[in-house]
Amino acid sequence: MTLQIITPESFSEHQAEAVFLPGAAGAFEVLKGHAPIISALTAGDVRWRDDSGEHVQPLRSGMVMVENDVIKVCAE
């Protein structure tokens, strides 16, 4: 899967096996083949796992869109 994190200051792209997101209705995990979804994000950490381990990107708020194994996080 491809994780894209977009902020007003930067853009980063990562390959991930699993992505954990702080959804407005509760935290959730995205795995390969996840159904399309758009969700608001609350303050917390975007965490993803790849071959080299687990990584963390803190955020204050934002939105996420998941479609075709691409996870786009627009974060503040």
Image (spheres, rainbow, N blue to C red):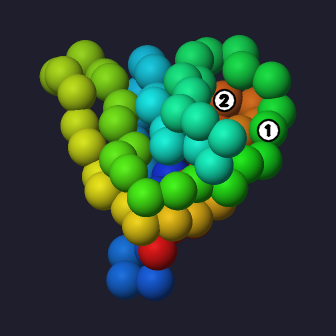
Q: In screen coordinates, is 52 left or right of 11?
A: left
Residue 11's place in the image compared with 16, above or below, is: below
| Position in image of residue 47 (x %, y %) | 35, 37
| Position in image of residue 65 (x %, y %) | 71, 48
Q: Which mark is residue 37?
A: 1
Q: Tell me the residue at 66%/29% (across/down).
A: 69
- Residue that protrudes farthest toward the front in the picture: 25
Q: Amino acid at mark 2?
A: Asp
From the viewer's side, name the closer residue of 63 and 14. 63
- Residue that protrudes farthest toward the right in the picture: 36
> Which quadrant is the N terminus positioned in?
top right
Q: Amino acid at mark 1?
A: Ile
Residue 55's place in the image compared with 40, above or below, is: above
Q: Tell me the residue at 45%/31% (across/down).
A: 20
Q: Tell me the residue at 31%/23% (across/down).
A: 50
One can see residue 1 in this view: no
- Marked residue nearer the N-terminal end (2 or 1): 1
Q: Secondary structure at mark 1?
A: strand
| Position in image of residue 34 (x %, y %) | 72, 20
Q: In screen coordinates, is 55 left or right of 75?
A: left
One can see residue 26 in this view: yes
Q: Residues within 10 Å of mark 2 (few under 14, many from 20)?
A: some
Mark 2 vs mark 1, foreground winner is: 1
Q: Residues within 10 Å of mark 1 (few under 14, many from 20)?
A: few
- Residue 49 image-quadrant placement: top left
Q: Which mark is residue 69?
A: 2
